[in-house]
Amino acid sequence: MIYIDPREVAADALTEINKTGAYNNVTLRKYLRQNGAMPKADRAFVTECVNGTLRNMIYIDHIINAFSKTKAEKMKPFICSVIRTAVYEIIFMDKVPDSAACSQAVELVKRRNFGKLSGFVNGVLRSVAKGWQTVEMPEKNTPEYLSVRYSHPLWIVKMWLSKYDFETVGKICEANNGAPDVCICVNTLKTSAGELKKTLEEKGISVKEGTYEKNALHLKGISNVAEMQEFRDGLFHVQDESSMLAVDVLDPAANEKILDVCAAPGGKSFYAAERMGGAGRVVSCDIYPHKTELISVTADRLGLGIIETRLRDASVLNEADREKYDRVIIDAPCSGLGIIRKKPDIKINRTGEDIDSLIELQKRIIDASAECVKPGGLLVYSTCTICKKENEMNFKYILERGDFEPVDISKNLPEALKEFSGGGCVQLLPGINGTDGFFIAAARKKAL
């Protein structure tokens, strides 16, 4: 049998993510599929190595640069990836002996025809293994400390500190570096949370009830939910509690007509249809055909016949939709700074300039979507980010149109979250609320 070195796979995946700005989850799926013969334990090792290195890369580079004359950003990309992942092993993976992390990295660079650099790699890693705990950190209680300690770009840390206190930002950053569990939304048209929880636990799966949502379950010990029989039977779909809360604020009712303008992968549409008891219509839209197809396939699996998918540019008004919907939800394309724990590549691929361009798109989507709401109907705006310009300022933009007024969303939120809401909106924070970083706001269209 051909041996596939998981460290080589991890280094190649990390190199691609850093060089091309590729998504970590997409890249990992590709490399794991290409190396399908790897044992389960090696596949798990690759996943942890890549995601763990991405989550901690600024800190890892800080350690590397303390011992290397050639700074991390100046190294050959593959060599840098090998060193970064090896340093991750040394610092964060207790089950891997430091000597193994060093020696395997050296052998890997030799095998990839970088033999002339094997001494350099060996020297850096041996020095890191011996002295990483003595490396000086930036002064505590500074943005620079949070940036290095929790591997968050300084611009993100400073942006959050402009709104939240130091302790809160520290908790957000720390939570972002944790590996998330899998949160699922139970399809109540086919089963109940209690019944599904019992079934999964009988199969040895660790299940925890939702913090805020009675129809949410958190799973551990699962490598691929799509392989579960309960998934194939349509008993659940994957969705974070924060996203489910946005549907609570939307508060869809049976026989209503709902528009989900940026629907993929479809979680909010599915949960809305389930809450409606399968009566009414949910029009679920996306700009990409493969995404609307994915929504259709999942809706069929869940048995949600009231979902209609449409290929639609959310930033352009379709005149046939003008004032036709009881409730419209915009889960806007955003910077994703609230889901860093799930997509750690965001920390290295996102910039402040990206946010400025996103805001213009978000406003066009708001304008087109607002016209689709019936007089007296509800518009819900949500994002999975923590950014005032994308969140509170965009909600202000909705209200300044003049045809919408804020609604009290606290009545549709769990008691524990009411204190975080006000003025028609709520910002959920990792490390504070135990969810993704998520913004939800609601406004009602003024009656004629």
Image (tube, helix red, strand yellow):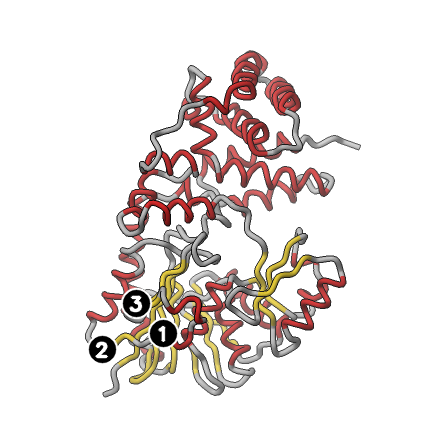
Q: What numbered label is drawn on residue 171?
A: none
Q: What numbered label is drawn on residue 409?
A: 1
Which amino acid type is marked by label 3? Ile
Q: Residues within 10 Å of mark 2 (few under 14, many from 20)?
A: some
Q: Image quadrant of residue 408?
A: bottom left
Q: Image height check: is 155 above or below 325?
A: above
Which amino acid type is marked by label 2? Asp
The residue carrying mark 2 is 403
Q: Of residues 139 and 11, which is closer to you in this image?
A: 139
Name the N-terminal-most of marks 3 and 1: 3
Measured in 3D between alpha carbons, the distance from the residue under mark 3 to the one under mark 1, in whole angstroms, is 19 Å
Residues at discs 1 and 2 in contact (Cβ within 8 Å): no
Q: Image height check: is 32 above or below 220?
A: above
Q: Residue at x 61, y 18 (%)?
A: 106
The residue carrying mark 3 is 366
Which quadrant is home to the C terminus? Answer: bottom left
Measured in 3D between alpha carbons, the distance from the residue under mark 2 to the one under mark 3, in whole angstroms, is 12 Å
